[in-house]
Image (cartoon, grey):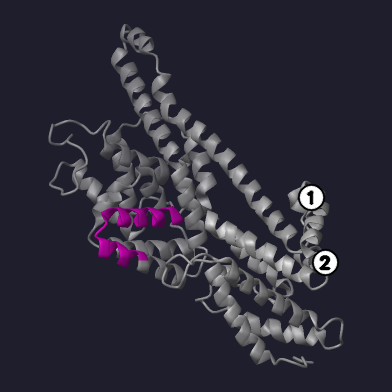
């Protein structure tokens, strides 16, 4: 049997659900214009009341014979509604099961999807307390003392493991404050863990950044210079030192707190359908153009590049840590990288649709501004762009021009002008990054 409710039709309910979805979008912290959404205690209470309405409507089915058929028809209609590409992915799983605990759905969006600024947190707690007091006032004469007594009884349970929070559907009996506090404690716990991880990464990154230089013993070099084959040994030592310096520098970029935040943001943004994130970047580009901000464009390009490698993040870091020095000089590395342009490389291009979409958008965004890539981390550019991408060819072509000392508007070192070889300069570092990833680490692009 289909939808069968005595007081509301399926069409009416779906229209109300569409309004509820609009509220959830605002609860995520932003208006459709991209501006921050401001929430006071009164509007937060209204959002919870919407949730309570859906809980009552779906709860009124009880265990009647028509319950299964009605829920199936509702879920089918919701599936069609949420399949629209314009709907944020976080709401794609909206179902009758979510709506039976709709206040929990509201609470998730209020607490877990945006920064908890002081004013927002104060409004949330005030709305929660007011709701519980209003509910108690209907049954208790001294409702204020009754509320405090409930808090005292719940104090013990709140000190238990926060992972075992009671399900929200029971909140009518215990009041809503308990569940809000539990969710806040969960968020606090996650933030505490993240802070500990960030502190550890800072120590690790700092250690990696300085290890290759500080641990080098000048006395060792002086001792080796006394030997007959000193030139070869010195060349090896200097090459090894430069290699390790570049390695530690680029690993520290991947472990930097800001970079990891970019990875987190990119992972969320590019998990959405292309039509959605293209709209986001379209608005960002308009803001950048209006403000003539080169910094804004550079950050957009960096985020797009990071978006190409989020699925390979862990393996990339593991690979970079494991890379060992080999004795090929920059000229030899350069020629091996150039072979990639002529089809002698067997490294496959990434077949992931998300990465292909990002690269396509990035190519259009860069246009004639290829110089923007030279403002990015050499390792990020090297590992984000597959060797058979047209963008890779443009990037490597510019490297070829500079390596040969020909005229270029994107000169990054003065080696050619000073008639020196590229050994320890930015161009050499960019060649080295292409070499270790595309020649030595071609498996990373599978």
Instruction: In this rendered view, identify the residue nearer to me: 361 or 170.
Output: 170
Disc 1 secondary structure class: helix
The part of the image, by quadrant, that contains residue 213 is: top left
Determine whether 243 is above or below 178 in the image. above
Residue occupied by mark 1: 155
SS class, disc 2: helix
Residue 384 drawn in magenta: no
Q: Earlier in the sequence, mark 2 or mark 1?
A: 1
Residue 374 image position (x, y, % from top left):
28, 47
Residue 115 appears in the picture as rendered: no
Q: Mostly what secondary structure, the magenta segment? A: helix
Q: Give the image location of residue 137, x and y in percent.
A: 77, 70
Q: Is residue 228 above or below residue 185?
A: above
- The residue shown at (34%, 43%) is 378
User: Where's residue 437, x and y in %?
Assistant: 42, 44
User: In whole angstroms, how far apart are the C-alphas of marks 2 and 1?
Assistant: 16 Å
| Residue sitting farthest toward the front | 142
Give 365 or 25, whichever is nearer the viewer: 25
For the record, the magenta segment spans 284-307
Q: What's the mark number on residue 173?
A: 2
Q: Residues within 10 Å of mark 2 (few under 14, many from 20)?
A: few
């Amino acid at each position: 049997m289909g939808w069968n409710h005595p007081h509301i039709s399926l069409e009416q309910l779906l229209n109300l659900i569409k309004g509820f979805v609009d509220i959830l979008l605002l609860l995520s912290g932003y208006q459709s214009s991209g501006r921050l959404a401001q929430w006071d205690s009164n509007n937060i209470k209204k959002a919870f009341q919407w949730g309570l309405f859906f809980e009552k409507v779906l709860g009124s089915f009880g265990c009647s014979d028509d319950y299964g058929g009605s829920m199936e028809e509702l879920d089918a209609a919701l599936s069609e509604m949420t399949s629209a590409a314009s709907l944020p992915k976080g709401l794609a799983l909206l179902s009758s099961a979510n709506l039976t605990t709709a206040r929990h759905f509201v609470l998730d969006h209020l607490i877990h999807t945006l920064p908890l600024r002081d004013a927002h947190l104060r409004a949330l707690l005030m709305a929660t307390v007011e709701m519980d007091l209003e509910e108690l006032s209907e049954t208790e004469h001294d409702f204020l003392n009754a509320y405090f007594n409930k808090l005292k009884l719940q104090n013990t349970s709140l000190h238990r493991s926060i992972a075992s929070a009671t399900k929200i559907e029971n909140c009518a009996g215990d009041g809503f404050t308990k569940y809000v506090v539990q969710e806040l404690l969960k968020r606090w716990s996650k933030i505490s863990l993240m802070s500990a991880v960030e502190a550890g990464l800072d120590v690790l990154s700092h250690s990696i950044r300085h290890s290759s230089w500080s641990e080098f013993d000048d006395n060792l070099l002086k001792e080796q210079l006394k030997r007959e084959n000193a030139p070869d040994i010195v060349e090896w030592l200097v090459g090894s030192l430069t290699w390790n310096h570049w390695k530690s520098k680029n690993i520290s970029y991947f472990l930097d707190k800001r970079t990891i935040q970019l990875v987190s943001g990119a992972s969320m943004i590019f998990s959405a359908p292309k039509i959605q994130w293209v709209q986001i970047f379209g608005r960002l580009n308009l803001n950048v153009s209006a403000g003539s901000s080169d910094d804004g464009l550079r950050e957009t390009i960096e985020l797009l590049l990071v978006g190409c490698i989020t699925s390979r993040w862990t393996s990339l870091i593991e690979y970079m840590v494991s890379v060992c020095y080999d004795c090929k000089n920059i000229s030899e590395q350069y020629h091996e990288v150039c072979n990639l342009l002529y089809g002698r490389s067997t490294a496959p291009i990434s077949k992931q649709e998300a990465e292909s979409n990002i690269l396509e958008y990035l190519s259009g965004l860069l246009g004639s501004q290829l110089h923007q890539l030279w403002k990015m981390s050499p390792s990020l550019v090297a590992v984000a762009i597959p060797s058979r991408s047209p963008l890779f060819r443009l990037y490597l072509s510019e490297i070829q021009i500079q390596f040969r000392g020909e005229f270029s508007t994107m000169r990054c070192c003065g080696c050619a002008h000073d008639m020196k070889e590229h050994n320890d300069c930015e161009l050499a570092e960019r060649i080295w990054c292409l070499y270790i990833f595309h020649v030595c680490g071609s498996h990373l692009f599978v």
